[in-house]
Amino acid sequence: MAQLNANIPYIQCYIRNKYIGLGEGVTEGYIFGVKSMLNRPLLFHFQSNFGAIFWMQPISAFVHSPEYDILSEDEQTRLSLLQTWDCQSNSIAVTSFAFLQYKTVDVHCRDGAWRKGKYLFTIDDYFSDLNDLNLGYANDPDSKCYQFIQMEDGNFMVHPNNLLRWHNPDFIVPYDKENIPKLSVYAEELTSEDIDRTYGNSPYYFYNDTRAKSTGDGTKD
């Protein structure tokens, strides 16, 4: 069965009133969950400070500061700058990677601009039920996760690794933004089961070979 919904580390933030029918401005509350639906943007769940829960709102509905960059007056364009790819499955998992926690990251957005933020957690979709048709790309070598990033401009973004430039003063020297490396990730599927069956067919494979071995002097071990 597809998971659809998942908990996320709850985030104190604001929902834009445009998305909840309250006119201009923003309303304070907490994002606490996320929903994945194939070929739809990620959808988040929000508890408002006046007691209402708003279900299935896109990332473009939320900001962490009332003084945020609108990016575009067109909501479709705004969403496309905050999330590049739609969901690849109905099942998702959420992980906070300690190694990346609060690290600074530059995001290369669809409009060609670089914007800066910090990592909060990761959302990754997957194909969960072998009895269902695998309609999405979650098991494809080109599958992409969503890194949830709190941006300096007051927005949140969810973007895949290939659009991110990470900072870690311990050992990273970030690449030149004007000379992005052209990388090709090794994607050939591998297996640990070698096609040579010599080892697999050996009695030693099962640790139960009772055959005595000759020592060459007429005796046996």
Image (cartoon, rainbow, N blue to C red):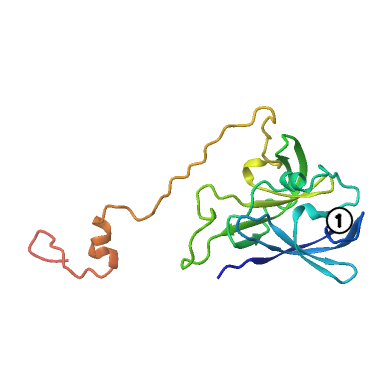
Name the amino acid, label 1.
Lys
Of residues 179 and 98, which is closer to you in this image? 179
Identify the image quadrant of residue 44.
bottom right
Picture layout, residue 1 above or below residue 140:
below
Please tell me which residue is depicted at 66% across the width and 41% down the height of the picture: 163
- Please state if 211 lies on the left or on the right of 92 as rendered: left
Whether residue 92 sits left or right of residue 72 in the image: it is left
Residue sitting at the far top = 178
**Residue 197 rendering spot, x and y as whole percentages:** 25, 56
Answer yes or no: is residue 169 visible: no
Q: Residue furthest left?
A: 218
Quarter containing the C terminus: bottom left
Foreground pick, 163 / 71: 71
Q: Is residue 42 above or below residue 75?
A: below
Residue at the image position 75 percent from the left and 51 percent from the top? 102
Residue 35: quadrant of the picture: bottom right
What is the x, y in percent for residue 21?
87, 61
* Residue ID for mark 1: 18
Say which residue appears at 53% left-offset and 47% top-offset: 142
- Which residue is located at x 75 percent, y 35 percent? 113
Q: Nearer the viewer, residue 66 or 55?
A: 55
Residue 128 visible in the shown view? yes
Where is residue 73? Give x, y as percent.
83, 44
Q: Quadrant of residue 78?
A: top right
List x then y, in percent, for residue 131: 46, 68
